[in-house]
Amino acid sequence: MNLLARISKQFNDSAQTKLAAMETLAAPIAQAVETMVSSLLGNGKIMACGNGGSAADAQHFAAELLNRASRWSARRWRPWRSPPTPRR
């Protein structure tokens, strides 16, 4: 098998894996999102933890949530930050 055919096969295999995962994981992911939103709307928290590589995954997940939230509410005060100091 030549190089281009191998590369094409890798892309195709990756796409097929993602399509299969979508059918299996879409409902549990939607349920998890609803749970997280409900927690935040009730002044709750989303906590992520891990050990070793899982800790890196948890840190990345938390950073993604914070970055998206800060873009979404760029001009709103966020409770995880101190309120602005009044200027004199």
Image (cartoon, helix red, strand yellow):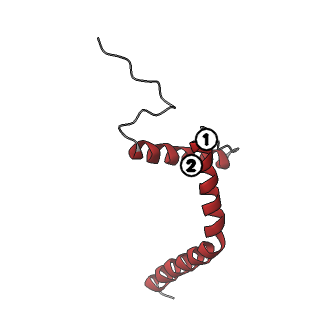
Q: Secondary structure at mark 2?
A: helix
Q: CA distance from mark 1 to mark 2?
A: 21 Å
Element type at mark 1:
loop
Q: Amino acid at mark 1?
A: Gly
Residue 39 horizontal/vertical position (percent): 62, 45
Could one spot residue 59 in this view of the protein? no
Instruction: Looking at this view, name the residue that lies furthest to the right.
Output: 51
* Residue closest to the eye, 63 or 46: 46
Which residue appears at 46% of the width and 45% of the height? 69
Determine whether, in the image, residue 4 is placed left or right of residue 15: left
Q: Residue at x 61, y 55 (%)?
A: 34
Residue 23 vertical position relative to residue 61 in the rendered view, above or below: below
**Residue at the limit of the structure toward the front, as seen here:** 42
Quarter holding residue 51: top right
Q: Which residue is mark 1?
A: 42
Front disc: 1 or 2: 1
**Residue at 44%, 24% in the rendered image:** 83
Task: Please state which amino acid type lies under the numbered disc 2.
Answer: Phe
Mark 2 lies on residue: 61
Residue 42 picture location, percent across and down:
61, 41
Q: Position of residue 45 (x, y in %)?
A: 62, 39
Report crowding for label 1: few under 14, some 14 to 19, many 20 or more residues within 10 A (C-alpha). Answer: few
